[in-house]
Image (cartoon, helix red, strand yellow):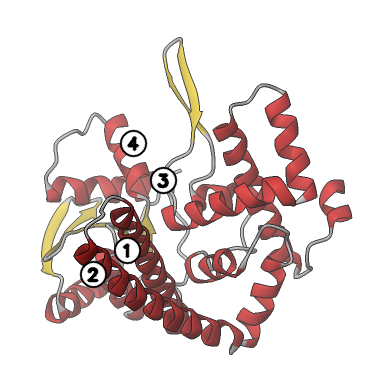
């Protein structure tokens, strides 16, 4: 059963927002600045939509989603990969912003995504800190690779100075993240619960706190889809491809995958699970993804029940 009220689809680019309204099919354009967002909020209040869907576009959507949500509008951020698949299913292959906005609206009308409260200011700040930490780690890895490829003393000194500066920044970011998490009783308890699982360290726990606040509130299939760890099969006619994982929150999926590599070696339950998969002939990468998905299911249950890791209970479930 499709939604019967007005559905708004918004395609966000660097400088503007393209808006499509269903069922009438009208379109709007707004600036992605303060004035444009304020005017858009007023226009949408008049329309009284039952859902406003914004496609995630690498962070450009965050300010728009926050502005619309603060105006009391029912906002949901939708997965761009899922929208693309939906567009292809409709035979919609043209790539223009107004068409994309209409497809987003039709996607929301057909799939009825659940509206959830956006993270509060403290959670958004923590997410920004975690993202900045990830950027610094990536820069350090790139500099270390450059160091290994040169023997020029002048360049080595330059790289070492930059690495020292980045290490200083990393230490400061880590201290700020630690103060944020340990200074909040709720986050401190949540981190301790997540880190009670062998293989899950502070970085993974804090990434989940910052970037997956829904953890513990959804079912295992929903939370796997949100992380991009729900498998789907590519199929056409009689041809059936391999199961894949895609979409979802890439940073969360990456953190879980790295934790799964550790847990697959040192967590007794997940180690045995991985060994069974490999013994059954599953490729190692498939086994690693399955371990990541099972780890996420365990973490989701731990936060749902607010009970720390218990090997006996996990093996019995």
> Is residue 264 in view from this perspective?
yes
Dot 3 and dot 2 residues touching (CB under 8 Å): no
Q: Position of residue 78 (x, y in %)?
A: 37, 54
Q: Nearer the viewer, mark 1 or mark 4?
A: 1
Q: Quadrant of residue 169?
A: bottom left
- Relative to 290, does residue 79 appear above or below in the rendering? below
Give the alpha-carbon distance from disc 4 to disc 3, as whole Å: 11 Å
Q: Marks 3/2: CA distance? A: 39 Å
Look at mark 1 in the image and give the residue it sits on. Answer: 139
Give residue 103's position: percent from left, percent from top.
25, 45
Separation (CA) of disc 1 from disc 4: 33 Å
Q: Are marks 1 and 3 in contact (CB under 8 Å)?
A: no
Q: Nearer the viewer, mark 1 or mark 3?
A: 1
Q: Residues within 10 Å of mark 1 (few under 14, many from 20)?
A: some
Residue linked to disc 2: 158
Q: Secondary structure at mark 1?
A: helix
Mark sitting on residue 46: none
Q: Nearer the viewer, residue 317 or 171?
A: 171
Sequence-first tag of 1 and 4: 4
Question: SS of the residue at dot 2?
Answer: helix
Residue closest to the eye, 302 or 80: 302
Disc on res. 247:
3
Mark 3, Cα crowd under 10 Å, few <14 / some 14-19 / many 20+, is some
């Amino acid at each position: 059963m499709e939604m019967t009220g007005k559905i708004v689809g918004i395609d966000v680019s660097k400088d503007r927002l393209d808006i499509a309204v269903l069922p009438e099919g009208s379109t709007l354009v707004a600036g992605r600045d303060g004035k444009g967002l304020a005017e858009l909020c007023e226009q949408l209040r008049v329309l009284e939509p039952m859902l406003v869907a914004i496609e995630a576009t690498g962070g450009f959507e965050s300010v728009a989603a926050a502005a619309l949500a603060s105006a009391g509008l029912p906002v949901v951020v939708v997965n761009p990969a899922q929208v693309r698949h939906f567009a292809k299913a409709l035979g919609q292959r043209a790539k223009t912003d107004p068409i994309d906005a209409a497809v987003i609206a039709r996607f929301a009308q057909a799939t009825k995504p659940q509206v959830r409260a956006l993270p509060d200011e403290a959670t958004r700040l923590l997410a920004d800190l975690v993202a900045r930490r990830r950027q610094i780690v990536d820069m350090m890895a790139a500099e270390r690779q450059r160091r290994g490829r040169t023997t020029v003393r002048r360049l080595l000194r330059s790289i070492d100075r930059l690495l020292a500066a980045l290490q200083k920044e990393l230490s400061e970011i880590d201290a700020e993240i630690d103060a944020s998490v340990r200074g909040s009783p709720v986050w401190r308890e949540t981190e301790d619960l997540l880190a009670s699982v062998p293989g899950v360290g502070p970085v993974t726990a804090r990434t989940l706190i910052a970037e997956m606040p829904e953890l513990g509130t959804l079912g295992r299939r929903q939370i796997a889809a949100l992380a991009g760890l729900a498998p789907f099969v590519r199929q056409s006619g009689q041809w059936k491809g391999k199961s894949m994982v895609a979409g979802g929150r890439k940073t969360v999926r990456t953190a879980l995958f790295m934790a799964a590599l550790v847990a697959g070696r040192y967590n007794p339950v997940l180690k045995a699970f991985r060994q069974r998969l490999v013994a059954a002939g599953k490729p190692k990468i498939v086994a690693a993804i399955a371990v990541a998905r099972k780890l996420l299911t365990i973490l989701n249950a731990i936060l749902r029940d607010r009970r720390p890791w218990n090997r006996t209970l996990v093996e019995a479930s």
